């Protein structure tokens, strides 16, 4: 659903929005920021990031929040929808000189009411391990910048480990550390462990144990974000070269690859059951990738600028019985798992086995809906539903829904032209965290042309029709999945791809499309000098990008826009004045943050607490906001 109205109404900051579950409301008194609430001058600073941890406090208020604003780092008790935020009493506050915090992550395994382990990455390349409750700094990694001199883009504890953590840099390298080891006083020497298309893994050569344990070199350009699968066995990496690469973490083997429509990928996340990955970036799209089939199954278009964060809502993702119980094709155990799944983290995990055992050739005994969200530099929040008509398009009814919404309503009949259908058979692994067989065979077909005789889209479908999209035309995907990891793919996409995508925007004027094309074609990096050498390098890189992009467009790595369903957002609302940098789904609320340094709490339907400062007797209007 696009922004409502026009002019002033479209620029209005929204304080609530409605979905099928009800109304989500902004809790103004639960806003976290710097103590003085003064908007932060964000020009030239790193994105505001937020991390949460629960310390299992017996008082029932065990949530803790950490966020960075410029050179400052804050640590508070997070009261969520229950009580108003008290910004005058941070548990810990730190101001850094010469560098800025860029990202952080708590270790949930070691968190207690008396101690937490917080990793903080910095713009100069260092990583700090601190305890904001004890107000201690235990260790500083890459202190002399001998391991990597570029900024830290993402830091995460390895799931299930109290000592191992992973750090990504804008150099494109990924390092595995152990908190018990030192980093040494000399630059590390590496030995090749494993190499593949677009990546290499090295071990650190040393007589004694030292950091880093491993160095991954992934793609070209910055590694912007990575995410572990729910079971911790797989690692998804979003890179500036536009590639999503999914690795088996322990074996350091490439599982699958996807290429953005154009530009770099900035963010990535996993579905709660590990079956799907969503990525976003500089093409203004959210792209849904199937882990089992190793292919793009849908794209979402709702943002008007780069997508900075994507996240699944584990509480709203659901599985419902869509057939009579007598027709259920599965074991009794699976049936009970299905019935008890109605949302929430525990119930999401309980249905994981049942969802994971489904493949693209099974029947459809259940109705599946995945909810995920995205925020971007356009200051908009978008919510998306990924439904079974997109997930299982092989069924006749689903095929009708999907292709009706994909093909242009004005495309000419496919008479007189051969229909080019290519079937791709791949051997794939089960999604992470499953108990099913290790391998399975799946087949998917891509039809190059369709007639206009298909019925109109059903009301339930949330796919966006191509009112001005290209007419038919057939494209034969590669017969096998290949990863072009070594090619440099950035914002300078081929001109035909840019103009083609521009026609899909329902609200952009010709002038706006021109400005977008101009921005994307010149977003390859900051040029410090206007010398002819720099300009020649830029031109050469652009030509290389065009050639490499032309090789992937229309393949399984990067299907054309008309080859996959295009989702329409359920909600698309402007909620901030500055670009959005955070989206986190919690049990009773969702949390967003903008570059001004304001962290906002949005109560889920029915979860609005009566905050002390929101008492109707003290409110001028006499009503609860």
Image: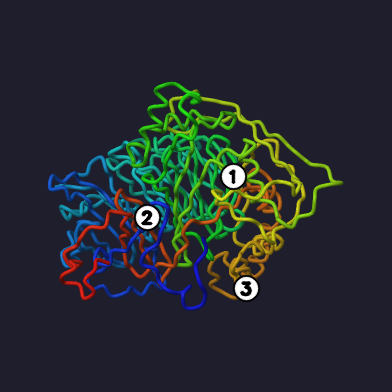
Vertical relation: 136 (above or below) 600: above
* Mark whose residue sits in front, 1 or 3: 3
Res. 143 image quadrant:
bottom left
Q: What's the distance in space between the residues labelled 3 and 2, CA to CA?
A: 33 Å
Residue closest to the eye, 361 or 523: 361
| Label at residue 296 | 1
Of marks 1 and 3, which one's residue comes earlier in the chain? 1
Within 10 angstroms of label 3, few (less than 14), some, or many (20 or more) residues? few
Of marks 1 and 2, which one's residue comes earlier in the chain? 2
Residue 549's x, y, as percent? 67, 53
Which residue position is annotated with label 3? 509
Which residue position is annotated with label 2? 22
Task: Tell me, yes or no, whether the two marked residues, 1 and 2, touch with CB atoms within 8 Å.
Answer: no
Give the residue furthest to the bottom.
Answer: 8
Which residue sits at x=58%, y=44%?
297
The quadrant of the image that shows the C terminus is bottom left
Residue closest to the eye, 534 or 609: 609
Of marks 3 and 2, which one's residue comes earlier in the chain? 2
Asked if residue 295 can be seen in this view, the reply is: yes
């Amino acid at each position: 659903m696009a922004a409502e109205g026009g002019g002033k109404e479209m620029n209005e900051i929204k304080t609530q929005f409605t979905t099928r579950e009800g109304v989500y409301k902004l809790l103004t008194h639960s806003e976290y920021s710097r103590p003085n609430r003064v908007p932060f001058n964000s020009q030239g600073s790193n994105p505001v990031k937020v991390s949460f941890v629960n310390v299992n406090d017996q008082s029932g208020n065990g949530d803790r929040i950490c966020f960075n604003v410029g050179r400052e780092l804050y640590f508070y008790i997070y009261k969520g929808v229950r009580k108003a935020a008290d910004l005058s009493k941070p548990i810990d506050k730190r101001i850094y000189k010469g560098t800025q915090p860029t990202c952080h992550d708590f270790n949930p395994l070691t968190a207690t009411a008396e101690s937490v382990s917080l990793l903080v990455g910095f713009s100069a390349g260092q990583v700090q391990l601190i305890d904001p409750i004890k107000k201690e700094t235990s260790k500083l990694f890459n202190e002399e910048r001998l391991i990597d001199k570029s900024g830290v883009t993402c830091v995460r504890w390895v799931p299930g480990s109290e000592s191992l953590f992973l750090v990504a840099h804008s150099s494109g390298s990924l390092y595995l550390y152990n908190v018990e080891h030192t980093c040494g006083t000399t630059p590390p020497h590496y030995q090749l462990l494993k190499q593949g298309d677009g990546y290499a893994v090295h071990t650190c050569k040393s007589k004694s144990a030292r950091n880093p344990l491993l160095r991954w070199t992934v793609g070209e350009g910055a590694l912007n974000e990575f995410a572990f699968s729910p079971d911790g066995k797989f690692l998804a990496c979003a890179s500036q070269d536009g590639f999503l690469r999914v690795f088996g973490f322990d074996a350091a083997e490439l599982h699958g690859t996807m290429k953005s429509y154009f530009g770099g990928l900035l963010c990535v996340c996993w579905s709660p059951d590990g079956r799907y990955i969503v990525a976003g970036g500089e093409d203004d799209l959210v792209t849904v990738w199937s882990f089992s089939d190793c292919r793009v199954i849908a794209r979402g278009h709702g943002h008007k600028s780069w997508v900075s964060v994507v996240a699944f809502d584990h509480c709203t993702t659901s599985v419902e019985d869509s057939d009579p119980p007598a027709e259920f094709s599965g074991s009794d155990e699976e049936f009970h798992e299905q019935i008890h799944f109605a949302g929430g983290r525990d119930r999401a995990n309980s249905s994981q086995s049942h969802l994971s055992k489904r493949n693209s050739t099974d029947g459809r005994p259940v109705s599946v809906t995945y909810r995920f969200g995205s925020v971007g530099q356009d200051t908009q929040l978008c919510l998306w539903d990924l439904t079974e008509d997109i997930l299982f398009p092989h069924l006749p009814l689903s095929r009708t829904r999907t292709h009706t919404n994909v093909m242009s309503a004005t495309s000419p009949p496919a008479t007189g032209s051969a229909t080019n259908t290519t079937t791709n058979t791949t051997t794939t692994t089960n999604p992470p965290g499953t108990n099913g067989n290790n391998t399975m065979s799946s087949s998917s077909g891509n039809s190059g042309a369709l007639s206009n005789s298909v019925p109109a889209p059903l009301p339930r479908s949330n796919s966006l029709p191509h009112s001005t999209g290209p007419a038919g035309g057939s494209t034969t995907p590669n017969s096998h999945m290949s990863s072009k990891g070594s090619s440099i793919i950035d914002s300078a996409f081929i001109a035909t791809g840019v103009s083609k995508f521009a026609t899909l925007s329902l609200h952009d004027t010709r002038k706006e499309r021109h400005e977008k094309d101009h921005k994307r074609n010149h977003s390859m990096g900051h040029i410090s000098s206007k010398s002819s050498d720099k300009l020649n390098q830029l031109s050469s890189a652009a030509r290389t990008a065009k050639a490499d992009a032309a090789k992937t467009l229309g393949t399984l790595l990067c299907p054309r826009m008309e080859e996959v369903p295009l989702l329409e957002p359920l909600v698309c609302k402007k909620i901030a004045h500055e670009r959005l940098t955070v989206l986190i789904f919690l049990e009773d609320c969702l949390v967003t943050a903008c570059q001004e340094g304001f962290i906002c709490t949005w109560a889920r339907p029915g979860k609005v607490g009566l905050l002390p400062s929101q008492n109707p007797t003290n409110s001028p209007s006499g009503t609860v906001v």
